[in-house]
Image: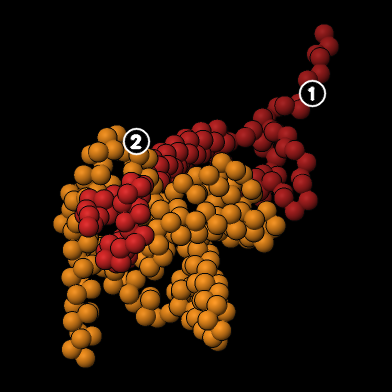
Chain colours: A orange, B red
Amino acid sequence: MVTGALEGRADAWDEIVRRYSHQVRLALLARGVALDAADDLVQESWMRLIQQQRAGRLRTLELPGLAIAQAGWLALEARRTAARRAAVARFAPVPALELEAVADTGAEADPAAVALRHERAALVRRALAECTPREREVFEAAYGGEARAHADVARAAGLSVQRVRQLLCNARARVRRALTEREQVDRKSEDDA
Amino acid sequence: VNHLRPDEIEALVIHGDPLADDSRRHLASCPACAGLVEREARLELAIYDGAAALGDERGAGAGAAPAPAASGAARGSLVWTYALSAIAIIMLGVAALLLMRQERYVRPATTAASMDSRGGTRVAPPPLDARFSPDTPCLRDPRTYMPGFDVVPPEPPGLRTTIHALKP
């Protein structure tokens, strides 16, 4: 799929957009971008990536990381533009925005991010150990590297979409509980400090 | 004020389902609902991240180990490899046996058969007047060294006697 996209095949790009758009939109929503703006930015991100590929400037395609980084950069640009316009309207100096919004691009090099990722992996592993094999299978298919759509997971597993969603809901509830508990512990320790 | 219901937020964040127009408009104007969506999205992203990290760790831990589907194929190919190897070894063994039976190595005679005291081969001694092949340089027939080889056997008495006819 990635190879096909790098070769410029339209069907490969369609599949990539279909598969990873949800994660890109989630990344924007998680940064506080409004839903309508997030949808626009997702589209814009894919268009930019396709343009980069057509211009021959796209050598590798790490997904969904690259699309999320692109969307994050666009969101930052949108905020900058909005801040600039507001400042011009108020005759005030343009505020400098931090580059935290595109932190995904260098996440692999950040030791704290790496540690957090390992910790999350351990929590997910522990939570999945309590799930049934079917729940685990469905969860890994939906949330794994390929991030397959629920309909695709259902087709592959020979289940109905409704059943897949039910299994996914059970597995996700356990994982979510583990992650939330950890988050609360972190928040409490921060408050104590 | 009708805030977004939990199932609407769940449908939006987890399944990526589109929101109804009313809910969409409300979300755009309600900081509380936007905050809830943001929090759920962050959590959902953390789940994606954790699952991806788990997949990466499994991949790194397994090293070059194949995926479950591939390992089944590898097991099958391993059985075939063993079977083919065993067949090849058996065929080589049979071929070697056949060759050994056809071309059994014969030790060249270093002593005359008639002088072999071990009695291994029961060969009649060659007649004294037997003609041997001319000697090959450096490989003279050892039988020519046997004692008495050059001794001329005694002629029977009267062999060369000339009998003159009696004249009447």
Residue that appears at 23% across and 85% down? A190
Residue A110, image x, y percentages = 43, 79
Residue that appears at 67% across and 30% down? B157
Residue B91, image x, y percentages = 48, 35
Residue A144, above or below B35: above
Specify the amino acid type for callout 1. Thr
Residue closest to the eye, A131 or A22 = A22
Contact check, label 1 and label 2, Cβ < 8 Å: no
Residue A148, above or below B3: above
Q: Which residue is mark 1?
A: B162
In the image, taking residue A147 as reference, residue A185 lies left or right, namely: left
Q: Chain of mark 2?
A: A
Counting every numbered tag in the picture gives 2
Mark 1: which secondary structure?
loop
Residue that appears at 44% across and 48% down? A19
Name of the residue lying farthest toward the left: A130
Residue that appears at 22% across and 80% down? A187
In the image, taking residue A131 as reference, residue A117 lies left or right, namely: right
Q: Which residue is mark 2?
A: A155
In the image, taking residue B82 as reference, residue A77 lies left or right, namely: right
The label on residue A135 is: none
Q: Quarter holding the C terminus of chain A?
A: bottom left
Specify the amino acid type for callout 2. Arg
Residue A83, image x, y percentages = 51, 76
Image quadrant where residue B65 sits = bottom left
Q: Chain of mark 1?
A: B
Within 10 angstroms of label 2, few (less than 14), some, or many (20 or more) residues? few
Residue A93, above or below B138: below
Image quadrant where residue A59 sits = bottom right
Q: Work out whether residue B54 can be spotted.
A: no
